Image (cartoon, rainbow, N blue to C red):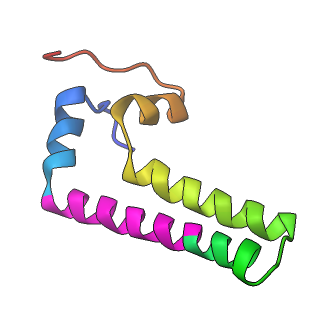
Amino acid sequence: MSDAPVTYDEFDAWLLHPATKWLREAAKALADDRREAWAVASWEAGNANPETLRELRGQADAHLWLADISYDGICAALEQDPVADSR
């Protein structure tokens, strides 16, 4: 990590970048895939193995966290205070 903390404005600029939008779209697709795998395992295949279902749910949740990433969410995950700027 760089020495200078990321500001709200820098984060917002990053969110608008086409590569970031692409990454978030992929994360949403992966989350949808894990949700579908959960449904197949629990309903269609009749596999109610709690460990498998927790793993699939955890993977979906992780992908959704990335897809819905926020400045405050990152600060909370890193236990850092937000950096004030133009807001």
Residue 67 shown left or right of residue 52 in the figure: left
Q: Is residue 42 above or below residue 71?
A: below
Count of numbered labels shown in the rendering: 0
Q: Residue at x 39, y 62 (%)?
A: 28
Figure quadrant of residue 5? top left
Q: Residue at x 22, y 58 (%)?
A: 21
Residue 87 shown left or right of residue 61 in the figure: left
Give x and y (percent) for residue 46: 81, 79
Q: In the image shown, does 85 or 56 lie closer to the viewer?
A: 56
Q: In the image shown, does 87 or 48 lie closer to the viewer?
A: 48
Q: Is residue 35 above or below residue 79?
A: below
Q: Which residues are magenta?
A: 18-35
Q: Is residue 69 above or below residue 17?
A: above
The overriding secondary structure of the stretch rendered in magenta is helix
Figure quadrant of residue 39? bottom right
Any magenta on residue 22? Answer: yes
Give x and y (percent) for residue 8: 24, 28
Q: Residue at x 47, y 24 (%)?
A: 80
User: Which quadrant of the rendered structure holds the N terminus?
Assistant: top left
Give x and y (percent) for residue 67: 38, 53
Any magenta on residue 80? Answer: no
